[in-house]
Image (cartoon, grey):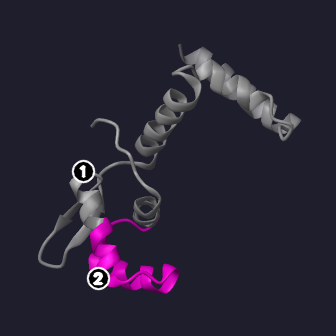
Amino acid sequence: MGEIKIFDSELLLMEYLWEHGPCIAADLAEEFLKRYNWKKSTTYIVLKRLEGKGAISREYPKYLVTPIVTRQQVQSAETNTLVDRMFGGSFASLFANFLNSDQLSEKTLDELQALIDEKRSKN
């Protein structure tokens, strides 16, 4: 599957589906009315957009909604968009910017180093 761009309202629904698994659309509409005060039509419009993007599937007769893309696929697409848009396609520039942050703790640096070491050992 190619990269998919998910907008904020769509991401709310995807996060719910990733956490809870397949759901009946009417139940989603009820849940999103409680959580975000969305009208039923709003939930159905967002679901239709997600289906059009290939992010979810729906099965009748009860309109069972199932996520097709994974959280990791969406994260990867969003990361690539950020790197392209803000850092000229350079991951090194992204990380240099990140590393210049004053909010990095020693623990975070250790975690990043462990991820780098793990990636190197796999290559």
Relative to 13, residue 29 above or below: below
Q: Secondary structure at mark 2?
A: helix
Q: Earlier in the sequence, mark 1 or mark 2?
A: 2
Which image quarter is the N terminus in?
top left
Relative to 25, residue 54 above or below: above
In the image: residue 20, left or right of residue 85: left
Marks 1 & 2, CB-CB < 8 Å contact? no
The residue closer to the viewer here, 45 or 71, is 45
In the image: residue 13, left or right of residue 84: left
Residue 40 highlighted magenta (yes or no)? yes
The numbered dot on residue 3 is: none
In the image: residue 11, left or right of residue 101: left
Relative to 84, residue 38 above or below: below
* Residue type, numbered disc 2: Ala
User: Real-space Cα distance between discs 1 and 2?
Assistant: 20 Å
**Magenta segment, prevailing SS (helix, strand or loop):** helix
| Residue receiving disc 2 | 26
The residue closer to the viewer here, 97 or 12, is 97
Q: Residues within 10 Å of mark 1 (few under 14, many from 20)?
A: some
| Magenta range | 19-46
In the image: residue 68, left or right of residue 31: left
* Residue type, numbered disc 1: Gly
Which quadrant of the figure has residue 39? bottom left
Where residue 20 sits in the image (x, y, percent)?
43, 68
Where residue 50 sits in the image (x, y, percent)?
29, 58
Where residue 51 sits in the image (x, y, percent)?
24, 58
Residue at the (46%, 43%) spot, across then down: 72
| Residue receiving disc 1 | 54
Which quadrant of the figure has residue 88? top right
Where residue 102 sits in the image (x, y, percent)?
86, 37
Q: Residues within 10 Å of mark 2 (few under 14, many from 20)?
A: some
Q: Secondary structure at mark 1?
A: loop
